[in-house]
Image (cartoon, rainbow, N blue to C red):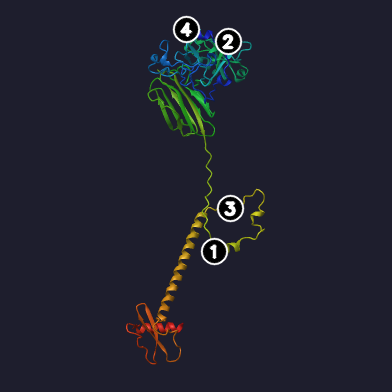
Amino acid sequence: MGTRALRGLLLLLPLLPPPWASAGSLHSPGLSECFQVNGADYRGRQNHTGPRGAGRPCLSWDQTQQHSYSSASDPQGRWGLGAHNFCRNPDGDVQPWCYVAETEEGIYWRYCDIPTCHMPGYLGCFVDSGAPPALSGPSGTSTKLTVQVCLRFCRLKGYQLAGVEAGYACFCGSESDLARGRAVPATDCDQICFGHPGQLCGGDGRLGVYEVSVGSCQENWTAPQGVIYSPDFPDEYGPDRNCSWAIAPPGAAALELTFRLFELADPHDRLELRDAASGRLLRAFDGARPPPPGPLRLRASALGLAFRSDARGHAQGFALSYRGEPRRAPARPRPARPAALTPLPTGLQDAAQDLAPAQGSARTPAELPDGADASCSPGPGAPQAAAGARVFSTVTAVSALLLLLLLLLLLLLLLSCLLAPGKGPAASGPSRGPGRSWAVWYRGPRGVALACPAGDPQAEGPVAGYRPLSASSQSSLRSLVSAL
């Protein structure tokens, strides 16, 4: 690890992390910001050291040219360095760290102790005193030990957990073993695996514990959320791999996938996502067509994943997290909004009062049982009924008004024909004696009725300018007057 790491490890004191920082179950990846056990992929924004470093602020990576790592040494951004002071792990140390202002003791860097930076499936570093062993299942040693070699060994033995220790030892166990284990800081598990210089395999009397489902080639996932790794992860996947996984969270209507890592060797290494019910291909990615950044939402309640590599395949692989979206309850129909009420005409108000129940009858709200709802809500057709009532009332009122105006005009016309102007004695009506008749003369809008001599149906006009009605009109008017 170099002079920087050796000098820092000499000053480290035991520091117990919070309980939730030492467990990274595959079934609870929500808080995880790292998908490699040493946090080399951390791209978060923590910019201060851990409690052992007294929470000191980190130096910006573009101000550390005098040290081994700076933004100038990472022009492509492969290690995540740049014009910022966020914690990173550019040298593959046991966890992210940063440079700080040099102290009197000559310390110029510190670990960051980021609680959210734990690989899902890596459960933490635990004490192994050997009596009894931290994991009580079978064990073995190998000079070619890697994390996945130990995981595969315990998976074949049928155990849930695998632990690596001292760079070359592997132990198997169950969750009951872990329940009585004692967690220690991640920095205690700092031994490099004998079979892979880029991986850590526990420490002296310290077990790095994993779930055996990490890097499995076949698995059924029914948890509401989880993480699926490529085969042999955190080792590179090998050639001619043909693996499949099923994702079926209970009650899910859709699935949301997010690729945390994706590195395939070439276009012949391919990952397919299919609808588990129909087998329909939904999406496919390979070494030339990586998945898009950010969440990927698929309308399927269950998915089938299939990965194939060719004879030359060797790459880091992928890590994807999934989350089931539950089905939404059907929306309840909204009640109809009550229509605006219009006042009833006077006659209808009287009728409504006559129809109202007598006080104290069985229909009065006063006699409803306790807790009953006495409010009134309109039926489904209330707005249409109210609109129809308003139209009917308006048409009835207009019709009555027109009829009244028509009768009034007829009456005025009749009176204008029967009443004489004020130039002579007004005739009060026709005489009904024998041999008497009337004749009507008019000028402009005025008319006068005069008595005709016996046997003479046409009397002389009263003054010049008055003209008599025609004979037929005179006869019709006489009949009308006689009827009155």
Q: Earlier in the sequence, mark 2 or mark 3?
A: 2
Place of residue 197 in the rendered image (x, y in percent of width and height, measured from the top left): 47, 11
Secondary structure of the residue carrying numbered label 1: helix
Distance of mark 2 from mark 3, alpha carbons?
77 Å
Q: Position of residue 163 (x, y in %)?
A: 56, 15
Image location (x, y in percent) of residue 357 = 63, 60
The amino acid type found where label 2 is placed reads: Gly
Q: Which residue is mark 1?
A: 346
User: Decide: marks 2, 3 in contact (CB < 8 A)?
Assistant: no
Q: CA distance from mark 4 to mark 3?
A: 84 Å
Disc 2 to disc 4, C-alpha distance: 24 Å
Report the Cα–Cα distance between label 1 and label 3. 23 Å
Q: CA distance from mark 1 to mark 4?
A: 102 Å
Residue at screen point 43% across, 31% down: 281
- The residue carrying mark 3 is 376
User: Circle 2 — which element?
Assistant: loop
Label 2 vs 4, first from the N-terminus: 4
Circle 4 sits on which residue?
Answer: 3
Q: Quadrant of residue 308?
A: top left
User: Which of pointers 1 and 2 indicates the residue nearer the eye?
Assistant: 1
Which one is earlier in the sequence, the residue at label 1 or at label 4?
4
Pointers 1 and 4 in contact (C-beta within 8 Å): no
Q: Could you classify mark 3 by the number of other residues whose Cα lies within 10 Å: few (under 14), some (14-19), or many (20 or more)? A: few
**Mark number, residue 205:** 2
| Mark 2 vs mark 3: in front | 3
What separation in Å lies between label 1 and label 2 (alpha carbons)? Answer: 99 Å
Between residue 219 and residue 78, name the one nearer to us: 78
Q: Is residue 388 visible?
A: yes
Residue nearest the observer in this picture, 40 or 249: 40
Q: Are marks 1 and 3 in contact (CB under 8 Å)?
A: no
Which residue is located at x 54 percent, y 64 percent? 346
Q: Residues within 10 Å of mark 4 (few under 14, many from 20)?
A: few
